[in-house]
Image (tube, rainbow, N blue to C red):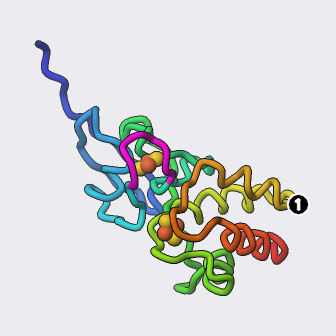
């Protein structure tokens, strides 16, 4: 069987260009956590169901367990580590804290990134739009209401 050679890729991760050599089969979430060392992005399933691994790929939310690292070559990736502004939690993160939008926190990075994609569009959002934007993200703790409330609060400050 022919051997598949490693690939050298460069990904802009939270504003920094990271060059690395990877196996073609490496998933983007494995690259983020294992190669780039940014472990805020979580893995919560092996079925592409939970959304804990959601990141922004060229501003679009993707489940990073469904994307190969090699597919992100040359792209911009933003993770939860990229949300801080001037060393402080961003407005959305502050709203999550204020409105008790997390309990165990395992789903939170993915929720934050899915919500960021919605808020970054700059459109007026209602509760239905928030619920739709978060529909690919599972939370086993909160019952979702406080998460929706937090995103709505951040949207109103947009
Ligand atoms: S880890 Fe569950 S969807 Fe990616
Ligand atoms: S806060 Fe625990 S899974 Fe969402």
- Residue 1 x %, y %: 11, 12
Label 1 beta carbon within 8 A of ligand 2: no
Q: State the residue at coordinates (66%, 70%).
A: 147
**Relative to 104, does residue 114 appear above or below in the rendering?**
above
**Relative to 15, does residue 98 appear above or below in the rendering?**
below
Going by the image, does 93 lie left or right of 3? Answer: right
Q: Is residue 130 visible?
A: yes
- Secondary element at image label 1: loop
Going by the image, does 114 lie left or right of 130? Answer: left
| In the image, farthest residue toward the top | 1
Nearest the eye: 103 or 34: 103
Quarter of the rendering occupied by the C terminus: bottom right
Indicate yes or no whether the magenta region holds residue 47. Answer: yes
Specify start and end residues of the magenta stretch as a single range: 44-51
**Relative to 32, does residue 5 appear above or below in the rendering?**
above
Quick one: label 1, few (<14), some, or many (20+) residues within 10 Å?
A: few
Indicate yes or no whether the magenta region holds residue 113. Answer: no
Q: Is residue 108 visible?
A: no
Instruction: Label the magenta part by its dominant secondary structure.
Output: loop
* Residue 2 figure quarter: top left
- Residue 87 x %, y %: 52, 85
Going by the image, does 26 lie left or right of 129? Answer: left
- Residue 9 x %, y %: 33, 42
* Residue 88 figure quarter: bottom right
Q: Which residue is mark 1?
A: 124
Q: State the residue at coordinates (78%, 76%).
A: 153
Q: State the residue at coordinates (77%, 55%).
A: 121
Going by the image, does 136 lie left or right of 82? Answer: right
* Residue 8 figure quarter: top left
Nearest the eye: 148 or 110: 148
């Amino acid at each position: 069987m022919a051997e598949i050679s490693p690939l050298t890729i460069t990904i802009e991760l939270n504003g920094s260009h990271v060059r690395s050599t990877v196996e073609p089969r490496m998933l983007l979430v494995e690259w983020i956590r294992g190669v780039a060392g940014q472990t805020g992005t979580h893995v919560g399933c092996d079925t592409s169901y939970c959304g804990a691994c959601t990141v922004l790929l060229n501003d679009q939310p993707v489940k990073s367990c469904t994307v190969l690292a090699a597919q992100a070559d040359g792209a911009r990736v933003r993770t939860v580590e990229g949300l801080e502004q001037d060393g402080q939690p961003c407005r959305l993160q502050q709203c999550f804290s204020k409105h008790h939008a997390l309990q165990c926190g395992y789903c939170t990075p993915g929720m934050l990134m899915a919500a960021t994609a919605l808020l970054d569009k700059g459109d007026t959002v209602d509760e239905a739009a928030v619920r739709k934007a978060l529909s690919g993200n599972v939370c086993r703790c909160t019952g979702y209401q406080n998460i929706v409330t937090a995103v709505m609060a951040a949207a109103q400050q947009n």
